[in-house]
Image (tube, helix red, strand yellow):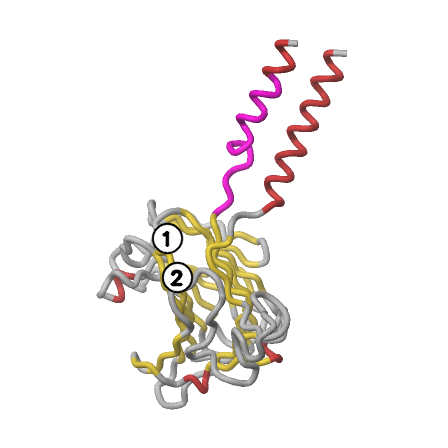
Amino acid sequence: MVHRQLCGGVILFVACLCVAFESGAAIIASSGFNDATGLNSDPTPNSPFTIGQTVDGRGAGEPGWADNWLVQQGGALGGGEHALILGAAALEGDGGLQLEPNPVFGQTRAIRRLATPQNRRFVIEQDVNFIGVNSLYSRPSSSAVGNEGVSIGPEWRISGPIGNRHFDVLDGIGDQLESNWESTGIDAKPGEWQHVLLDINVATQTWTFSVDGVMYNSPDPLGFRGTPPNIDNIEYITDSSGYIDSVVVRDAPEPAFLALAPLGIAFFGLRRRR
């Protein structure tokens, strides 16, 4: 009887662990680029976004942000016509973000600031589908730092020629240099949606990178490009053509065995006292 009760307790505890892993973590901020359906959509027409128009200055009402999306070209505001909300750019809902290269300045930059700067471990995830040549960069950073290089934390990109495009990560050492690019060996698939996830630890200035659940096994922990005290800017810079959807910033999940250890101790302690 005791053996049966103990086995039952083990099964219950393992089940709780599974629930903990599946339950996810709290959302810090999210952007769905939608109007009437999908993530953060609402009943108000053309809110938070207007299908067919620029993302620049839009996104009011989406949770967790200090302000709306901004588009930049050549280091200054402008070029919003190269960052549009389109149904064709959507993975979910009725809209997604299409980014195009700027014919004058080359790059188009879309950036948005979190309401709460993150100075601990957290996660950024997004869906990307880039069909053009050249590169897409993403480099979460801190608005509290004036020097751009110092402000950048993790940095990743899609690059490579047609037929051999891949995801790269910058393994920084806080010196602002961009010389330590590493190929993850994970293929970028033009015309296909891929889910990119960064698990970022600001306290240790390290991060991990995965695509569609496949983690890049770096030779050593990936470091930040600079030394930001926190991260609050989410940005995408491109001289390529493609789509971004479902940008979600969330708490990093706690290890379930740690989160539920008190429950297990209490349970097994109760069984022993009986």
**Label 1 vs label 2: CA separation?**
8 Å
Q: Position of residue 45 (x, y in %)?
A: 58, 79
Task: Give the extent of the magenta segment.
Answer: 252-268
Which dot marks residue 154?
none
The x, y position of residue 84, in whole percent, is 50, 82
Q: Quadrant of the C terminus?
A: top right
- Looking at the image, which residue sits at the far front? 44
- Give the residue type that dot 2 points to: Leu
Q: Which residue is mark 1?
A: 118
Most frequent secondary structure within the magenta stretch: helix
- Residue placed at 39% from the left, 76% from the top? 70
Q: Disc 1 vs disc 2: Cβ atoms closer than 8 Å?
A: yes
Of 266 and 180, the residue lying toward us: 266
SS category of the residue bearing label 1: strand
Residue 93 falls in which quadrant of the image?
bottom right
Left or right: residue 177 compared with residue 258 = left
Q: Residue at x 62, y 70 (%)?
A: 91
18 is higher (above) or lower (below) than 11: below
Q: Which residue bears the numbered disc 2?
A: 114
SS at mark 2? strand
